[in-house]
Image: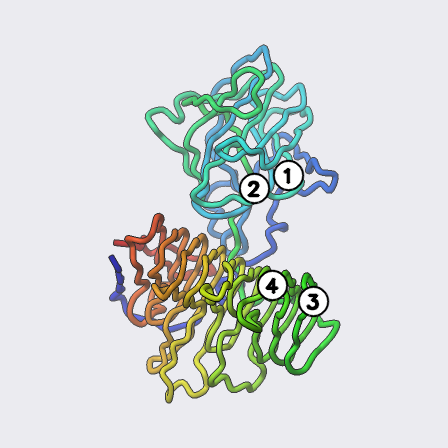
């Protein structure tokens, strides 16, 4: 059934997400306690060096105001004993994240100083290896850690296993941690059990109620902002074009270009990288169907100074494209997803930011603006993005996210913050929704409306913005 949820709290129209997210956004790399090693093994850390999250929890709100710090599963608990193993033993922790992010390092706790190098690995629940490190012999007990050569992305709704192999030495242990179905929660990480390998296995499969303190350094994804999405700060184009610029070469890579006008993509597998479109649009439907494989990275589509926006269509359209760190700012329409009957392909929007504003003649037209709209759209994937619709009492627009039952295929959403509109989130298509956040009081009618019977997963929250942080007001149930 379709469920429309309204919130009767006094509505306070404000545009505060840009300020909030600018405070919270700092390059993830500066938050890592463990530095990367270009040689592929990562940088070893002194045995007693804790992760940032091992500090008392009272320090966490201040850290949240600047940027997310790396933390692990075992923030406070420590082993109470160690088992002597005469042969190589592999033990691990089975866990799942409740929000997307990246693992930057692997670590384990040793109650005695390791006398030999230890191999650590990160797996999917089915045993596919995602990353590994070799932690050299250390002269001290405590946490032993090493950075991954490359961070590994984790996704909500999936389970992972982090393990370490000790070559016939002591294994740290604490009994009955997972007895009777208990779990261990740490921020966005939930440990659901321990795993032990049979002799000769590198992937532990046998369950145990003990904890063996295999751990990760996890950094939650940072939401994009007006400053961090689009072309980089301080960027300058190598070339400027006035009017419509058309890309006709398949596989072309267009970089460091400013277009004062429209940008038409008339070839397949085109990449737009560090491109700024001022006062215009980007479209990949030049003929009977969309071109396919369009990749936009660090692309901005922004309103020109003094530009009249009455009658403008979507800033980016129509299908078969990926928007990665894209910014749309100041237009009456944002992302358009459509053209499925004509062969236009799926769309991916990740780490992107769109702020939609009313057209100049809004009072005299029936404006139905959306930050993202689907009409006969193919499958849509959204990751870690922000959609804002700034309206007025007499010119509300429709919704920051509008994907109704209008010939659309499906949605897969994990990490989306919405603000404004009549309803801030409107969905009538099958799929899954995780980590949806709606800014409290930013809408005219209610936080969302959705056909709950079509959704396999629903995870949404109403949030307030306090001192540069998103604070959960309450869960938003569907149905």
**Which of marks 1 and 3 precedes in the sequence?**
1
Residue 187 seen from this side: no
Of the two numbered discs 4 and 1 in the rendering, the one whose residue sits closer to the viewer: 4
User: In percent of the image, x 27 and y 64: which residue is there?
Assistant: 7
Up/down of 181 relative to 218, above or below: above
Circles 3, 1 touching at the beta carbon (< 8 Å): no
Mark 3 Cα shell of 10 Å, populated few (<14), some (14-19), many (≥20) = few
Q: Earlier in the sequence, mark 4 or mark 1?
A: 1
Callout 4 crowding tier (Cα within 10 Å): few <14, some 14–19, many ≥20: many
Kindly identify which residue carries mark 4. Answer: 296
What separation in Å lies between label 1 and label 2 (alpha carbons)? 8 Å
Residue 249: which disc? 3
N-terminal of the two: label 2 or label 3? 2
- Mark closest to the chain's N terminus, 3 or 4: 3
Q: Which mark is residue 425?
A: none
Q: Secondary structure at mark 3?
A: loop
Crowd class of label 2 (few under 14; some 14 to 19; many from 20; radius 10 Å): many
Residue occupied by mark 1? 148
Task: Report the residue marked by disc 2.
Answer: 103
Q: At which x and y percent is residue 384?
A: 49, 56
Quarter of the picture containing the N terminus is bottom left
In this view, the mark in front (3 or 4): 3
Q: Are marks 4 and 1 in contact (CB under 8 Å)?
A: no
Picture quadrant of residue 90: top right
Residue 27 image position (x, y, % from top left)? 61, 55
Q: Are marks 1 and 2 in contact (CB under 8 Å)?
A: yes
Q: Is residue 243 above or below residue 451?
A: below
Q: Earlier in the sequence, mark 2 or mark 4?
A: 2
Rendered location of residue 479, percent (x, y): 25, 54
Measure the alpha-carbon separation of dots 2 and 3.
38 Å
Left or right: 249 with respect to 449? right
Location of residue 58 (image quadrant): top left
């Amino acid at each position: 059934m379709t469920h429309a949820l309204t919130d009767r709290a006094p509505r306070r129209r404000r545009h505060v997400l840009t300020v909030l997210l600018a405070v919270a956004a700092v390059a993830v790399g500066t938050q890592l306690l463990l530095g990367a090693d270009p040689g592929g093994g990562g940088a070893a850390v002194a045995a007693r060096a804790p992760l940032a999250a091992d500090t008392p929890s009272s320090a966490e709100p201040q850290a949240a105001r600047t940027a997310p710090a790396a933390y692990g599963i075992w923030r406070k608990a420590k082993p109470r004993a160690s088992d002597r193993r005469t042969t190589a033993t592999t033990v691990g922790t089975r866990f799942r994240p409740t929000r997307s992010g990246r693992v930057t390092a692997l670590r384990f706790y040793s109650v005695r100083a390791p006398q030999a190098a230890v191999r650590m690995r990160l797996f999917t629940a089915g045993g596919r290896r995602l990353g590994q490190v070799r932690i050299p012999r250390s002269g001290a007990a405590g946490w032993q850690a090493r950075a991954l050569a490359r961070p590994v992305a984790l996704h909500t709704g999936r389970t992972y296993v982090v393990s370490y192999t000790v070559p016939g030495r002591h294994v740290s242990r604490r009994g009955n941690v997972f007895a009777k179905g208990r779990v261990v929660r740490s921020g966005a990480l939930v440990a659901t059990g321990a795993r032990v390998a049979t002799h000769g296995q590198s992937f532990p499969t046998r369950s145990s109620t003990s904890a063996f303190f295999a751990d990760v350094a996890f950094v939650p994804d940072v939401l994009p902002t007006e400053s961090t999405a689009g072309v980089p700060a301080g960027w300058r184009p190598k070339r400027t074009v006035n009017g419509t610029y058309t890309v006709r070469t398949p596989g072309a890579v267009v970089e460091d270009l400013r277009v004062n006008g429209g940008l038409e993509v008339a070839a397949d597998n085109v990449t737009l990288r560090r491109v700024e479109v001022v006062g215009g649009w980007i479209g990949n439907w030049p003929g009977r169907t969309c071109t396919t494989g369009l990749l936009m990275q660090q692309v901005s589509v922004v309103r020109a100074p003094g530009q009249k926006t009455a009658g403008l269509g979507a800033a980016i359209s129509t299908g078969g494209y990926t928007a990665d760190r894209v910014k749309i700012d100041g237009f009456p329409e944002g992302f358009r997803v459509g053209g499925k009957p004509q062969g236009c392909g799926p769309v991916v929007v990740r780490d992107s930011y769109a702020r939609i504003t009313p057209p100049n003649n809004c009072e005299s037209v029936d404006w139905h603006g959306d930050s993202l709209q689907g009409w006969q759209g193919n499958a849509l994937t959204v990751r870690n993005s922000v959609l804002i619709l700034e309206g007025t009492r007499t010119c509300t627009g429709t919704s920051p996210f509008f994907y109704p039952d209008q010939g659309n295929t499906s949605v897969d959403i994990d990490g989306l913050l919405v603000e404004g509109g009549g309803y801030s989130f409107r969905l009538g298509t099958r799929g899954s929704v995780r980590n949806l956040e709606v800014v409290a009081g930013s809408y005219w009618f209610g936080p969302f409306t959705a056909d709950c019977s079509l959704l396999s997963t629903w995870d949404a929250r109403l949030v307030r913005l306090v001192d540069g942080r998103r604070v959960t007001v309450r869960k938003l149930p569907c149905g």
